[in-house]
Amino acid sequence: GSAQSALNFGAGPAKLPREVLEEVQRDFLSYQDSGMSFIEMSHRGKEYTKVNNDAQSIVRELLNVPANYKILFMQGGGTGAFAAVAMNLMGRTGTADYAVTGTWSSKAAKEAAKYGEVRLVYPQHKKSGSIQDQSTWTLNPNASYVYYCDNETVDGVEFPYIPETNGIPLVSDMSSSIMTKKLDISKFGCIVAGAQKNIGPAGVVVVIIREDLLGNSMKCCPSVFDFTYIAKENSVHNTPATFSVYVMERVLQWIKKNGGLEVMENQAREKCGLLYKTMAESKKFYTCPIDENVRSRMNVPFRIGGGDEKLEELFLQEAEKLRMHQLKGHRSVGGIRASLYNAVTLDDVKLLVKFMIEFQATHGP
Ligand code: PLP
């Protein structure tokens, strides 16, 4: 039966829908009565071929991906994608523009600088918890692409808009926001997203790439990172993370069954809204250091008692007793972070809010 599941507010790998895990568990030892586990099956067999095709189709359907885009499944994580983006797309002009808005875009820019000239769209990001308005950006017309991270998982900022780039291909890391809102894919040249937050287990990275951008990879690009090659080989160039792709396909079907991206988007607003409201009403017991217009719907960092580390530690301990897990802030920023991906329910968030209010009543000034 389904043991009462814990509340998991982890930033990734993160909570997945219980129903999907149960379905995968039922199928685990004998996939579709074959007597074999899915993880034992060839990536060139009919079962994986179907999962691979179904997974591409459901990504295309949910995000309304136009026909002139390829959908690829790769390995190497989000970090691998930082290098892959550069090796595949920077060769055209040797330079690319980066918007650095936090930890992950900063890492992406550093990685890309190994392969060409990285230019920042505005002088180095100073104020954490903010995203500079696009009116302050300058773009290099010669850039091979403009790169940004849609949702900064560590810092808790999310772009409230899609940058305009005057025809320069736009590249986005959507690892922590993919499938949480509708998107006009035609505005992008390339989207990369590690699956391990909103859509599946670690091990697979989804790449959505406009076809005319293929064919420009650098000579040094390993074939496992070469979008052109992976596209040509339908993501079975070598052994893919078969189990991860399989579970991801199931999660994407769950999203569809539950109303698709419109419902995910509405729920995301409602869930984060409850937390931000609780903080606003806490008379600064809970504080969120993020500019209001760029607060992430997915990762909500906050401090307690003005950054009282002892109190924060106590909060985490008491949360654990209530089976609320993975609320610790990223090691680089400290404090608390609640991640609210698609599988986190409104009821989960209500329980967290109830706990926050009780904790304040007991430990507040
Ligand atoms: N990009 C974003 C937005 C992330 O949140 C993360 C990881 O948390 C990464 C990239 C790096 O992903 P990985 O750990 O798969 O390399």
Image (tube, grey):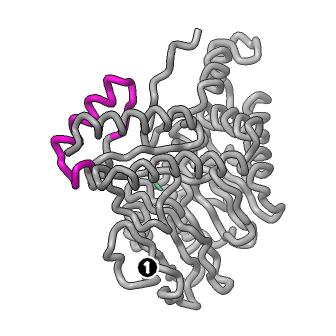
Looking at the rendering, in which quadrant would you find the N terminus? top right
* Magenta region: 304-327
Look at label 1 and name its amino acid.
Answer: Val
Query: Which quarter of the figure has residue 41?
Result: top right
Which one is nearer the viewer's eye here, 32 or 281? 281
| Residue 57 location (% of width, % of height) | 79, 46
Which one is nearer the viewer's eye here, 182 or 272? 272
Q: Is residue 272 above or below residue 226?
A: above
As drawn, the residue found furthest toward the right would be: 67
| Residue 116 location (% of width, % of height) | 45, 78
Q: How many marks?
A: 1
| Residue 178 location (% of width, % of height) | 61, 53
Q: Which residue is mark 1?
A: 118
Q: Is residue 236 visible?
A: yes
Q: Residue at x 16, y 41 (%)?
A: 310
Q: Is residue 115 visible?
A: no
